[in-house]
Image (tube, rainbow, N blue to C red):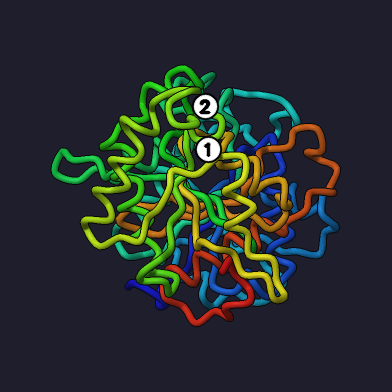
């Protein structure tokens, strides 16, 4: 079983956050067609109640059974190794039990997709402190998925992309301190990010994307006046990428390149198809400012499809039933498109 003949698997995220609630809200829409939730049935029943009730929760034996699930039903494939009292863990706070459960769901989701029992993975938000409290040695989804995708002793090179209908950005560095991120900006890491972004773009119909590469320093270093990383590291990486036939240009000033790349319909296409940014906040602030409800996080470079909403666990509203599922809806639609399903281009990032 593979491709469109297999369901998308949704991990329920941190049980103390809004993940289960946005998943429950997803199953009140047609977008949930062909999805299965990997998690805890009792947690999902609680989420159904919190979001208005009238949703049955069906425990499945196989992921494939979700394809026959009726409307108004949340098909749940129980994950192994979850704490027995997970549904009693208080909402809105860090708890090691939720961290353990989140990790177990991610591990089993990867097993399903690698065996062909799932077409792709869509992950609800997890909490990094809960992972740490549980003794899970990864700072987030991206690093954990990279490790789980290791084959024959080799970890794939992966990168984080955040996308919405107006802007795409791919990051050279992610969940490390800013001081460490600057150290990790090397010619090889920049070049590899450009390569990964270029290769991934073909999956959404752009075999030759226009890639803008942002600088690291103010004004992209201003010719070395404000730092020389653009001269020593970033420009040579761009030149190497262009020598490989990749349409990459820059380095551009980080404070203006995102405006130039923004696709603002109608009638205002961007100059570029995506931006490669050196650090986490350089790249993600512009996308999130345009609206977290439409953003999608995509892990590029994995041997399988993985998307997620572009927001966190929102402990402050967990349990209120007010969580907005829009970003999760967008993540499911993007996963379908990347997995090869026929999805309208208007329903996913451009």
Quarter where residue 294 is shown: bottom right
Q: Residue at x 48, y 23 (%)?
A: 225
- Seen in the picture, residue 23 relative to 149 is either above or below; the reply is below
- Find the distance from the CA under tag 1 to the CA under tag 2: 8 Å
- Name the foreground residue: 117 vs 217: 217
> Picture coordinates of residue 290 (x, y %)?
72, 52
> Picture coordinates of residue 326 (x, y %)?
72, 59
- Seen in the picture, residue 129 relative to 190 is either above or below; the reply is above
- Name the foreground residue: 30 vs 268: 268
- For the N terminus, the image quarter is bottom left
Please name the residue that numbered disc 2 is placed on: 131
Q: Residue at x 28, y 56 (%)?
A: 242
Q: Residue at x 42, y 19 (%)?
A: 180
- Seen in the picture, residue 150 relative to 97 is either above or below; the reply is below
Quarter where residue 244 is shown: bottom left
The answer to the question of whether label 1 and label 2 lie on touching residues, with beta carbons closer than 8 A, is yes
Q: Which circle marks residue 36 in the picture? A: none
Instruction: Determine whether, in the image, residue 115 is placed left or right of residue 222.
Output: left
Residue farthest toward the left in the current orientation of the protein: 152
Please name the residue that numbered disc 1 is placed on: 102
Q: Residue at x 32, y 47 (%)?
A: 238
């Amino acid at each position: 079983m593979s491709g469109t003949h297999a369901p998308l698997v949704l991990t329920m995220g941190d049980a103390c956050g809004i993940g289960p609630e946005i998943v429950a809200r997803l199953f009140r829409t047609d977008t949930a067609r062909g999805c299965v939730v990997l998690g805890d049935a009792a947690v999902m029943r609680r989420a159904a109640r919190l979001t208005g009730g009238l949703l049955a929760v069906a425990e499945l034996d196989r992921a494939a059974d979700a394809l026959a699930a009726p409307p108004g039903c949340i098909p749940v494939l129980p994950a192994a190794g979850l704490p027995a009292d997970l549904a009693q863990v208080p909402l809105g706070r860090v708890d090691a039990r939720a961290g353990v459960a989140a990790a177990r769901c991610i591990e089993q989701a990867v097993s399903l997709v690698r065996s062909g029992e799932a077409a792709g993975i869509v992950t609800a938000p997890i909490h990094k402190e809960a992972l740490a409290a549980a003794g899970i040695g990864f700072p987030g989804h991206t690093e954990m998925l990279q490790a789980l995708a290791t084959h024959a002793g080799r970890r794939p090179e992966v990168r984080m992309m955040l996308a919405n209908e107006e802007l795409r950005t791919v990051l050279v560095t992610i969940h490390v301190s800013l001081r460490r991120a600057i150290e990790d900006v090397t010619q090889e890491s920049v070049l590899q990010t450009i390569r990964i972004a270029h290769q991934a773009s073909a999956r959404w119909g752009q075999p030759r994307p226009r890639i803008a590469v942002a600088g690291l320093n103010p004004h992209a270093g201003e010719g070395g006046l404000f730092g020389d990383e653009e001269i020593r590291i970033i420009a040579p990486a761009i030149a190497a990428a262009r020598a490989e036939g990749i349409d990459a240009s820059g380095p551009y000033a980080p404070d203006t390149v995102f405006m130039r790349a923004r696709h603002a319909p109608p009638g205002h296409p961007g100059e570029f198809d995506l931006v490669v940014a050196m650090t986490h906040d350089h790249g993600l602030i512009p996308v999130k400012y345009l609206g977290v409800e439409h953003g999608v996080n995509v892990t590029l470079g994995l041997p399988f499809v993985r998307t997620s909403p572009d927001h966190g666990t929102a402990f402050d509203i967990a349990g209120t039933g007010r969580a907005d599922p829009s970003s999760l809806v967008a993540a499911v639609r993007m996963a379908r498109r990347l997995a090869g399903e026929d999805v309208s281009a208007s329903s996913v990032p451009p």
